[in-house]
Image: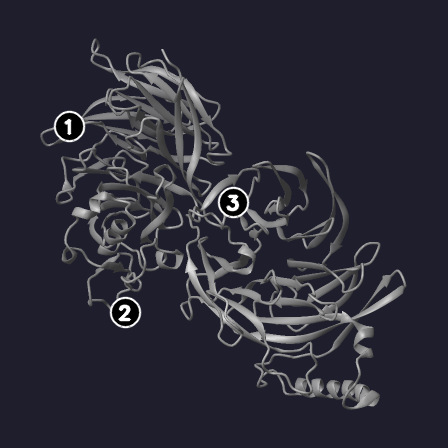
Amino acid sequence: MSKAHLSASTVHISASTNRFNHAADASTSSLIACGSGKLIALWNTQDTNGRGIFQTLPGHESFVTCVRFLTSDSFASADDKGTVRYWRLFGTQWRTTAIVQAHKEAVSALCAFDKFLLTGSSDSSVKIWGMQRGDVTDEVTEFQTISLQGYYPLSLAVASLPSSEAIILAIGGTDRNVRIWTRSDGPFIRSVTLSGHEDWIPALAFRVPSTPNDPLVLASGSQDGTIRLWNVESFIKMQAQPQNHTGELGDELGDDLLDAFEASLGDLGADAAEGGRQISLKRHVLTVKSNSGTQQYSITFDALLIGHEAGVTSLSWSPSNATLLSTSTDSSLILWAPSPIISTAYSSSTSSIWINVQRFGDVGGQRLGGFVGGLWGSNGTETMAWGWSGGWRRWRRVTSGGATTGEEWEEVGAISGHSGPVKSLDWSPKGEYLVSVGLDQTTRIHGAIPSPAPEWSVWHELSRPQVHGYDLLGAAWLGPWTFASVADEKVARVFEAPRNFVEEVRGLGVNDLAQSEKTKGDRPATASVPPLGLSNKAVSDGVSYDTPAPELDSSRPRRRPFEGELASITLWPETEKVFGHGYESIAISASNSLELLATACRATSPQHAVVRVYSTAGYQPFGSPLEGHGLTVTRMAFSPPDDRYILTVSRDRTWRLFEKGVNGYLPVAADKSHGRIIWDCAWSCEGDIFATASRDKTVKIWKHSSDSGRWGAITTVKFEEAATAVAFSSAGADAHERWLAVGLETGDIKVYSNLMSTPDQWTLVLTIGSDLAHVDQINRLAWRATGNPSMKQLASCSEDGTLKVLIVHVVVD
């Protein structure tokens, strides 16, 4: 018999970005690396097909807090257990070449310069590390530790001083000052303190001078909502500048006048016109050693940029160094540039008026948390930022007009994902799209948008039907346009697709059924959640509660919705609530005919450990509740092809089988041979056998014996780790082979093969490790109903916060 070889690859990865403002960085070749849970996700923003995250790198054992590119083929990453990893690209593979336990506490800031790597941590210290590159491994050695005496570093920036070998380091933290340290040949020494900000300083960025006459500019952004620009320039150069108005005396006089002016500002008190802001024009002088002796530099306050309504979260200079990008928790991203128009006789060539030339995001719309951080991409033609919920928004420059006409930018697609463990997923009946739910209290629908080459259709999030107030735990499709979901509440909710969604998938070509769909008038346009409400209410044309219905622009080109739209205007109206349970729901399952719906809830007694079955025609109970379990029922499965049986598994380590009668399901079999909780169960596509997966590190296959008339275990598959998810797939209509995918607590997936004729013999044919699969417990696996037997698609979701669609390729020798 011919032997089949299996291999796997990822076609879709949905992952969010961690809520740390240094958690993502862009390389010069427009590769974005961002921390997503314990993983590092890679996204190529230049991908011509618009594909999102194409790879995740396992390695960190805790949340990734900082990522910084050193070169286009190397970056450093740090996590909240204080570990720093250095990654390098070998061919097409990223590998860790150095691991160092840098701090005992979380790393809060990371930056690199020349041969140095600098880490700041919430153990109130900044450490400087020397890096030695080897062929395959790199050496990281501690060079110096700077103790910050009780305040925490939130941001680090480092640059070389103008026309000098010396290095300048700026540290911003929780003490509202920017501390400047310098190094000429030995260790870094403390130089000056720049005061002025009134809150923590989470963002710092140096602008390297483009011509020898330009100063080095430090931008500092604070939670007080302001950005300050500081000029660092050679002190000798400043004294040598000809005084064109008042001569030598004026310089002395000027300083005295300034001191008096500052004192009078201080006398005005805190309620001054400036809102109490002190504007200090003091000149800070620092001295560094150089080859010719000593060199003096001055740092002066140059500009105060006011435009954000809330704290500044990140700052970044454009590659051309002309523009400063800032993001804020007020959900705006601002591009600042010096205005070339205003120039008076008194102002020197260095100072100028800074204005915000572009503003992106939601003006005035205080979305939860705003932007966490922002970056430049594609050599300064794109700006992007990620938000509190972990999704990105991206804008691309269309035209670069002159300074007067301004530039034109447009929003383009980016990446998104659940910002927490993904608890469940389900394919729509024909496999057109996939619904996922998670502890970030959202329900998301993912679909493949067809492209000219069918095997390269690109996956994206198409809709976010439910943004809830409770943790979502399960979802099941009840038809091509209807699904039900359960959350940490006592009701199950049923949702019906709005007209927006039907038109969107029709336009994108995701679902062929959309052509024959109901006429326009039958469906509500969209849905909205009333203030303080939990239920999505339908919004038909012109009828709304208090605000006009947010509609997807009907004139817009055929494209998928972006993060800003997904977060607000792709909700589905809720059509039904299904009551019955006395405690919070935990699991939901739909029958193969889609005519029945089963739900279960948390339970500590037999009275509540029941499965309730409803008919989807009117959501009335079908028969009486299925009793027998003593603790929470973790999963229910209807037997294909005709729903003759319901299989239920539970925390009480038993499975039970119920057979369909005229007036409901009746118990026919039960077994307690697993030693620990049974996490999952699944029927084979033919309905002749089923599998149960347990924390006792086994998966058991059960079959009905025609001799004894009982269901017995015909084989037990043992694992090194707890088995948490199982799913069967048939190899095709006329094939004699079938597969079983098993998800483990470690995040690995194993695929077993079996011949129909010998249901008790299962052989391991493929192991999908953490580089392709997950790094934490797998919550659910599901095979997609595709016609192609040589390319099966397997969807998986995990506690690590990612959802993946894997392609399992079959090559027959």
Q: Residue furthest top?
A: 707
Q: Residue furthest left?
A: 662
- Depth check: 561 or 406 in front? 406
Q: CA distance from mark 1 to mark 3?
A: 49 Å
Q: Mark 2 packing: few (<14 Cα in 10 Å), some, or many (20+)?
A: few
Q: Earlier in the sequence, mark 1 or mark 3?
A: 3
Residue mark closest to the camera, 2 vs 3: 3
In the displayed structure, would residue 48 be above or below residue 200?
above
In the displayed structure, would residue 355 be above or below residue 471?
below
- Depth check: 325 or 422 in front? 325
Q: Amino acid at mark 3?
A: Leu
Q: CA distance from mark 2 to mark 3?
A: 39 Å
Could you tell whether 568 is left or right of 131 in the image?
Answer: left
Disc 2 + disc 3, Cβ < 8 Å: no
Residue mark closest to the camera, 1 vs 2: 2
Disc 1 + disc 3, Cβ < 8 Å: no
Q: Which element carries disc 1, helix, strand or loop? A: strand
Q: Residue at x 68, y 34 (%)?
A: 136
Visible residue check, residue 580: no
Q: Amino acid at mark 1?
A: Lys
Q: Which element carries disc 3, helix, strand or loop? A: strand
Residue holding disc 3: 42
Q: Amino acid at mark 2?
A: Thr
x then y, percent, for residue 99: 66, 39
Residue holding disc 2: 547
In the displayed structure, would residue 748 be above or below residue 174?
above
In the displayed structure, would residue 405 be above or below residue 7?
below
Residue holding disc 1: 660
